[in-house]
Image: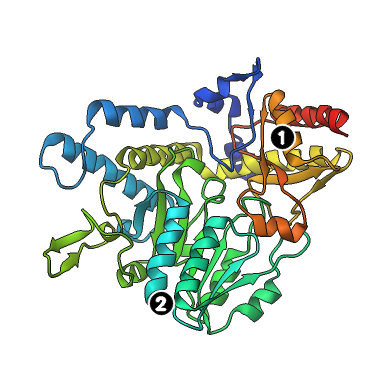
Amino acid sequence: MTKTDTIAELNLDVERLRKDFPILQTKVYGKPLVYFDNAATTQKPLPVLQALEQYYTIYNSNVHRGVHYLSQQATEAYEAARRKIAGFIHAAHEHEIIFTKGTTNSINLVAYSFGRKFIGKGDEVLISAMEHHSNIVPWQLICEEKGATLKVIPINEKGALKMDEFDKLLTEKVKIVAVTYVSNSLGTVNPVEEIIAKAHALDIPVLLDAAQAIQHMPLNVQELDADFIAFSGHKMYGPTGIGILYGKEKWLNAMPPFEGGGDMIKNVTFAKTTYNELPFKFEAGTPDISGAIALGAAVDYIQQTGIHAIQHTEEELIAYAYERLSAVPSLRFIGDAARRAGAISFLVGNIHPFDLGELLDKYSIAVRTGHHCTQPLMEIFNIPGTVRASFSFYNTKAEVDELIKGIEKARRILE
C-alpha cells in the first residue's frame, strides 16, 4: 500500500455519512443545525437507533436466566455486544469488559471496590488538575473514608501536565494513579503511555478516563497496559445510560463486588453468599440490555467507518477550526497543548461564555458553555468557564465557517 493510497483511504465521505444521522437534518430557528457539542454527547446513526427498536419490538426479554427463546436471543445479542467491545479495544479476555451506566459509574466502581481493599490510612491517590468531577469526587470520598490523601499533578499555562512534578509525586505511598486520557475541557491529550510506564515501574496501577478518547483515536488496552479504562456509550455514537469498565483480570478478581443483587451471585443463603465469576460479579441486577446491544451497534458503525479515518478527518477539521478561530480578534484559547483531540475551548474578549453561547444558539450553533464539570481547572485559569466547541467526523469546514460568522456577529452585539 502506497502512502497516497493510505491517505486516500483515510478521507471519509462526510456528506454521505451525515445522512446516517437523522438529527443532523434538523433545523433550529429555521436554520440548519450546527452541532458542536459532541464532547457532551454524540449523535446517533441509524444502525444504533434500529438496534434499540429491534430489541424492544422483536426480542425484548431479560438476559442470562431465561430458558425461553426470547431470553436466549436477548442474551446472545447482549453478550455479542460485549465481545464486540472487547475486540474494539483489544482486551485479552471478554470477561474483562464490565457493562456499567457510564464513565462516572465505572470510576465509582473502581474507587469504591479497589479502594475498600487496597487503600488505607496514610496512602495516596494521584490524579491530575484537569480531571472531570467524576474522576475527582469518588477518590475524595474513598480517601476521606480510609484516611488517605488525594494528590494532584499540576498543569502549565498551556494546559499540559507538568511531568517533572508527576515524577516527584509518584512515590511508594501512591496506591493508584487515575488520569484522563483526553481533557474534556481543554482537549489536551495526555502522555498516558509515559504515565503508565512510570507507575508500573513502582507496581502502581493506573486508571484511564477514556470518555473523550475512545471515539477519537485507536485504543489498544494491551499496548497501553492500563489496569482500568472507563468510557461512556453516548460519547461514541451509542445510547445514554450505558458505559464500560475495562479492568485487567487480576485486579477484577481481587476486588470485592460493587453492588449486591441478582446475577452477581452463584449461591445465596442467609448465612453466606458466594459471588459469581467475571464479568457478572460486577453486574448486579437487570442491566441496560438495549443500551448494551445498541452500543455494540455503535462499535460496528465505528469499525465500518474506520477509527483511523475518523481520527484523520477530525484532526484536519480541528486544525482548520483552530486556524479560523485564531484570526478572531480578542479570542484567546484556554488550553493550547501540543497534542489535542476533540475539543477547543476559548473566550472572546470580556464576553461571558454563557452570553456568547446563548447568542450562538440563536444562529442555530450548539456549543457548550460553563465549567464543563472541571471547576478546579477553571479556578487555576481564574475564569468562570469557557465556550467549548467539540467536534466529530460528521462535522464540516462549512460548519466551522458558520461558527466563525456567529462569533463575529455576537462580538458586534456583546462587545
Q: Nearer the viewer, residue 274 or 304?
A: 274
Q: From what the image shows, is residue 274 above or below residue 81?
A: below
Number of the label disc, if any, that sits on residue 357: 1
Circle 1: residue type? Gly
Decide if residue 362 is in sight here: yes
Q: Position of residue 338 (x, y in %)?
A: 73, 56
Circle 2: residue type? Phe
Q: Residue at x 41, y 56 (%)?
A: 245
Q: Is residue 79 left or right of residue 135?
A: left
Estimate how packed mark 1 is, as few (under 14), some (14 to 19) or many (20 or more) residues with alpha carbons within 10 Å: many
Chain-order first, disc 2 or disc 1: 2
Q: Position of residue 361 (x, y in %)?
A: 69, 28
Q: Is residue 11 left or right of residue 271?
A: right
Number of the label disc, if any, that sits on residue 323: none
Q: Quadrant of the N terminus?
A: top right
SS category of the residue bearing label 1: helix
Decide if residue 90 is in sight here: no
Q: CA distance from mark 2 to mark 1?
A: 44 Å
Q: Residue at x 38, y 37 (%)?
A: 297
Q: From what the image shows, is residue 135 above or below residue 38?
A: below
Q: Tell me where residue 91 sits by quadrant.
A: bottom left
SS category of the residue bearing label 2: helix
Q: Position of residue 406 (x, y in %)?
A: 77, 28
Question: Which residue position holds label 2?
Answer: 118
Q: Position of residue 331 (x, y in %)?
A: 84, 42
Q: Is residue 225 left or right of residue 363?
A: left
